[in-house]
Image: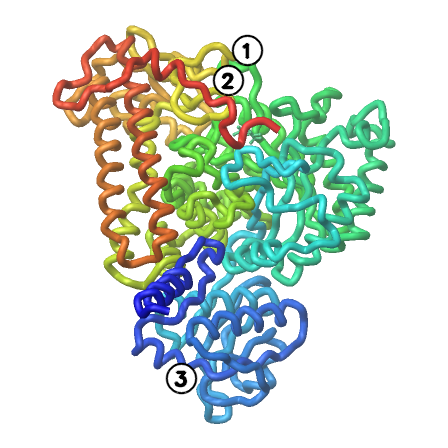
Amino acid sequence: MKKWTLFLIVIAITIHSQAENGYDLWLRYKKVENPTILATYTKSVTNIIATSTSETIRVSTKELKTGFNGLLNKPIAVSTIIQNGSIIIGQFSSISSLIKQPINIPANDEGYSISTVVVNGKSCTVITGKNDIGVLYGCFQFLRLLQTNQSISALHIQSSPKLKLRLLNHWDNLNRHVERGYAGIALWDWHKLPDYIDQRYIDYARANASIGINGVTVTNVNANAQVLTKPYLEKLKALADVFRPYGIKIFLTARFSAPMELDKFKTADPLNEDVRTWWKNKTEEVYSMIPDFGGYLVKANSEGQPGPQNYNRTHADGANMLADAVASHHGIVIWRAFVYSQDSDDRFKQAYDEFKPLDGQFKNNVLVQVKNGPIDFQPREPFSPLFGAMKKTPLVMEFQITQEYLGQATHLVYEAPLFKETFNAETYANGKSNTVAQVIDGEAFNNELTGMSGVTNIGNDINWTGHLFGQANWYAYGRLAWDLDLSSEQIADEWIRQTFTNESAFIKITKNIMMNSREMLVNYMTPLGLHHIMGNGHHYGPAPWSNTLARPDWNPVYYHKADNNGVGFNRTSTGTNALAQYSKEVAAQYLDSNTCDENYLLWFHHVSWNHPMKSGRNLWNEMCYRYYTAVDQMKEVEKQWAGLEKYIDQERFQHVKMLLGTQRKEAIWWRNACLLYFQTFSKQPIPSTYEQPDRTLEYYKSLRFPFAPGNGG
Ligand code: BDP
């Protein structure tokens, strides 16, 4: 073999070994690059001592071994010998006799503590919790410290989750089509379950446990009753068995009409005794197979789903029937508040109108799950007025991690700032300062049960989320469900370090891209409070002109109400008065079109195209400015990423690079299509200093996407 051939082979092997496809998520455990840090870690980590053999401690030990082997690039043994650098893990009750010294234990049942202690003269690290699951969470946190190059020498960390239910909602159908899924088909291979356990189920559970997720619904809220049949319960049991050591409970989406569909009942009336007995028996069957089954998640009387209103009963009647069925097993029912009706003059108001009167009528194991905003997961929404209004019912915050309205899986958009914006909003519930976060974490109304749900962006794509940066949204969602007070920036920082590198130049630029990405997206899609102007059905791309769907509240024109006088939805007292659903302090912030935060202007006001904006421009020119500036920012992002090639592997670099190219094209598409359309009403020119659209409005209107992903069943 010629010398250069050999050389090429060596190069090829090296490059190949470095290429990464994203499968490992933020759990890559690559060797610590900095030699000084590596040397201190090597001294501080010499063996693992586990004080029990429970399943959760077994997976904790395994994770530590995998992590240390990679990060320190040497095998770390599991033994019983206390030495300098022992990592001692186990429940507090089992380690206290071993270490014979006081240790701070975390506040709640799932919390952990990590402490540096001296045992028999040896310096060790103790990772403990009241329960095994806390220990596992602590182990993941310890590995995170190593992955992000933090000091591990004098640790006194205690952490407990702020929310009890930290859930992922999969909108996965039994045929594996994922509603609003942009990362392939569903992870769950129902056909091969229960006997075939895909390694992915285990890696999924690991990833979730690493960020504290403790419950998942594996099926769509547009539910299929089949999942409640014996064969599917067996498949679910197999998944539950995989998830259990990782502290993850299975929840089921329950189709309200299941007794009719599965057992030929004539009714699904929640007050009918036979129906109630059916659900009791079905629930007993579920628990006999999955003893730690979490409970039911229900979408009822919404978008064609059956529900109690079919029988003139209320949401509370429906929820309470299921709550009774799960109560003896400490199960819960999560009832969704995502409802709208064409009889309402404003879709914004419907959830509040239907649910607020029911406050106080739900059993104490029922939570109501409310989307962050009143309409539907838009790039920016004001918070739902139900937060702050339901004082006797615990509310679960529902965020959409999958990017249905946020460029789907081709746009890089970091969602933590969106989540935080909702959390930080003031509700002024009870006439005093109370943020949405305080409503969610139980502080505002003293709720025991607390929770958050995220509609996942996970599919069977090799990198799980389609866009590599979609992983950051899964990660950020979990981290915030654990601790609502973490900052978007801190989460981005730790995600980048674990996912890519600890190289500061790379972190700085990438973090900056992430932190600005959501605002940029808002401005090239729906600036100034525009909302729901995406393409019909699939919601891909702009279609503000769309007005052909059967119901007015399905059409974009319903939401922007552009005409020759101006644009925007008047939700003040001269309009639909949706603002009255907020506390008076919140309403006051939005009431006047001259003082209303401009980011929400068109959410609440129909204003003239010449409306004076804070910048000194009129509304039309401000709209042009926002669209154009955002596209310029997008071009800049592309350039910045191009400069990062040397820091990471080619495969992931190219993946992001290509998607940024698509994102730039689509941002231009959004800008041009929206401005050309709104211009037909504003009758004002796009300022000549801007590059003019190179296509006509007719061209943009003619585009069709019959096979856009994530749509339909
Ligand atoms: C909308 C989606 C639809 C979901 C619905 C829901 O377009 O596919 O079924 O939300 O949350 O955003 O139930």
Give the amino acid type for the residue marked by disc 2 in the picture: Trp
Give the amino acid type for the residue marked by disc 3 in the picture: Lys
Q: Is residue 589 visible?
A: no
Q: CA distance from mark 2 to mark 1?
A: 8 Å
- Residue under the image location 46 percent in, 70 percent down: 142
Residue behind mark 2: 554
- Residue under the image location 78 percent in, 50 percent down: 287
- Residue under the image location 54 percent in, 22 percent down: 350
Where residue 97 appears, x then y in whole percent? 60, 85
Q: Give the farthest residue toward the front.
A: 1
Q: CA distance from mark 1 to mark 3?
A: 68 Å
The residue carrying pointer 2 sits among few (fewer than 14), some (14 to 19) or many (20 or more) residues within 10 Å by Cα, namely: some
417 relative to 208, above or below: above
Residue behind mark 3: 43
Residue behind mark 1: 550
- The reply to whether the C-beta atoms of the residues labelled 1 and 3 are less than 8 Å apart is no
Q: Give the farthest residue toward the left.
A: 689
Q: Quadrant of residue 365?
A: top right
- Which of the pair 293/13 is nearer the observer? 13
Label 3 element class: helix
114 relative to 429, above or below: below
- Which of the pair 401/436 is nearer the observer? 401
